[in-house]
Amino acid sequence: MTAPRDADSLLVERIRRGEGEAWDDLIARYEGRLLAFVESRLGRRGPSEDIVQESFVGFLNSLPNYDGRRPLESYLFSICAYKLTDHLRREGRRPAVPISSASDTSGDWQVSDSARRASSIARSSERKQLEEKAIEGALREQIDRWREKAEWTKLMCAELLFVRGWANKDVAEQLSITEQQVANYKFDFIARLRTLIKRQDLSEEVFPELYADG
Amino acid sequence: MPRLTQADLQAYLDEALSPAEMAAIEAELRKQPELLKQLAAINARRDAGVHSVGEIWRRQRLSCPSREQLGSYVLGALDGGMAEYVEFHLQKIGCRLCLANLEDLRRQQQENSETVKTRRTKYFQSTAGHLRRKKS
């Protein structure tokens, strides 16, 4: 996504200095999409506006910790999602989910036999960010390439496989291509990511889905 | 539509699916309480730093159309391939943030400007006090 990050960075700087006009600008720029986000779930305008309002307060309170490299829109949506989730829980519509199941021995989280227990690979948050950044870069490069070449089917195929987690068969049916084509696209995509992981000395253990078949 | 996937549950935790799919998952959670264990397991895996390509893709919004492209989509001004992709992203991926942007863009064409102004003024007045505290 191409975000107007420079304009947002300047806006945030001005808000940090306490400029009311900048705060007004931010509200004008983002309140509509935040309201649409909340209202689509709640279906009621009044409580939805309250949640957007709480989100704006949450944003101002979290401003000292806001990392300006993160897109402002995504940050605002994440605060809004948090407030909405909290509201839905209080209404009983959304179940409370334990923050961690570290004590649960069911092992459901294991993606493949090659994946180890999550606790055994715990490591620093800096390391995790580095890994995510590396994969993000590789994905972005690949997605941009598909877009430039108008290879929309490949993009849709990868998105259904990895973002929605669909099986090859379902993807093939959705995109009206053969399962073999899906398998080929998937193979190429995974191979590219694996190469990058290897080149950057990243641990295979933290990307279990890329090694599930290997 | 395929059955509930692990990726769907991940997206559910992040409020990232379309409202209809979020509601469908909540209905499933009521029918199958054991799904809660799966959600907790996803949280545990995240805590430990195990990555999912799909989560990174979604979180970083790597294939989301820009707001300008969504605006062109609303106006029917996107070319064939891109228009088809945006439609796919909204309907099949169910990208909640793009759906919210799209709805906002549509509302901008319909909403009374006085209503919008009143709402924004209310937001400003109810939050500006927090801004001033940051200044001092």
Image (cartoon, coloured by chain):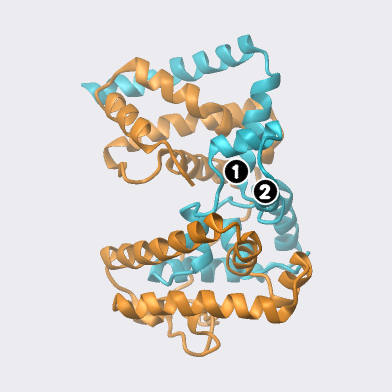
Chain colours: A orange, B cyan
Tag 2 near tag 1, CB within 8 Å: yes
Q: In the picture provided, is B73 more to the left or to the right than A173?
A: left
Quarter-of-image position of residue B6? bottom right
Chain under numbered label 1: B
Query: In which chain is the residue bearing label 2?
Result: B
Q: Residue at x 30, y 65 (%)?
A: A130
- The circle drawn on residue B90 is 2
- Split into 4 quadrants, where in the image is the C terminus of chain B? top left
Q: Residue at x 60, y 47 (%)?
A: A89
Badge 1 is on which residue?
Answer: B98
Q: Is residue A187 above or below residue B5?
A: below
Q: Is residue B31 left or right of residue A8?
A: right
Q: Which mark is residue A24?
A: none
Amino acid, disc 1: Cys
> What amino acid is at disc 2?
Leu
Label 2 or label 1, whichever comes before in sequence order: 2
Residue B53 image offset from top left, x and y in percent = 49, 68
Within-10-Å neighbours for mark 2: few <14, some 14–19, many 20+: some
Question: Is label 2 on the same chain as label 1?
Answer: yes
Q: Secondary structure at mark 1?
A: helix
Q: Is residue B108 left or right of residue A3?
A: right
What x and y, as percent, mark residue A207? 44, 76
Q: Quadrant of the N terminus of chain B?
A: bottom right
Residue at 43%, 82% in the rendered image: A117
